[in-house]
Image (cartoon, rainbow, N blue to C red):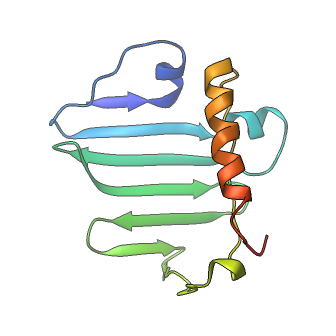
Amino acid sequence: SFIGEESVAAGEGSILTDNPTWIIDPIDGTTNFVHRFPFVAVSIGFVVNKKIEFGIVYSCIEDKMYTARKGKGAFCNGQKLKVSGQEDITKSLLVTELGSNRDPETIKIILSNMERLLSIPIHG
């Protein structure tokens, strides 16, 4: 089976089943792409029994290939990735994305979440 982000966004129905399924977003960061903001990727995932087996993200502008496989770790251009180990939230950097849905109820939820996040004493 195949699920494509652009076709789902266009209103086509999609149901994830237990069948082996490719999930593909050929222009991950469509809004960035439209505005010529250089953070765009091709994202591909493979799912079996509704569980991710592996994923690949190719950051086109940066020429970086991110790969991950269930139980095998994550890599960038073949080099193993790892978390920083930072446990002090006051030394952490918070990154978020607001999404593109401007439905009033969705905006209320996003703003409520942002308010909670901004009250955490983070570094930036």
Residue 35 lies, with reference to residue 58, above or below; the image says: above
Depth order, front residue of 94/70: 94
**Residue drawn at the location 74% of the way across and 57% of the way down:** 118
> How many numbered callouts?
0
Quadrant (top left, top right, bottom left, bottom right) of the C terminus: bottom right
Task: Please tell me whether residue 24 is drawn above or below residue 54 in the rendered image.
Answer: above
Front residue of 123/46: it is 123
Q: Seen in the image, is 3 located left or right of residue 36?
A: left
Q: Does 58 sit above or below residue 25?
A: below
Q: Is residue 123 left or right of residue 120?
A: right
Depicted 41 relative to depicted 88: above or below: above
Q: Is residue 118 left or right of residue 77?
A: right
Q: Residue 117 falls in which quadrant of the image?
A: bottom right
Image location (x, y in percent) of residue 27 = 61, 38
Residue name at image x 22 percent, y 42 percent: 50
Q: Residue 104 at x, y = what percent?
A: 68, 19
Residue 71 vs residue 91: left or right? Answer: left
Q: Position of residue 79 (x, y in %)?
A: 50, 82
Residue 98: horizontal and vertical position, in percent?
Answer: 69, 40
Residue 76 appears in the figure: yes
Question: Residue at 68% of width from left, 28% of height from top?
Answer: 107
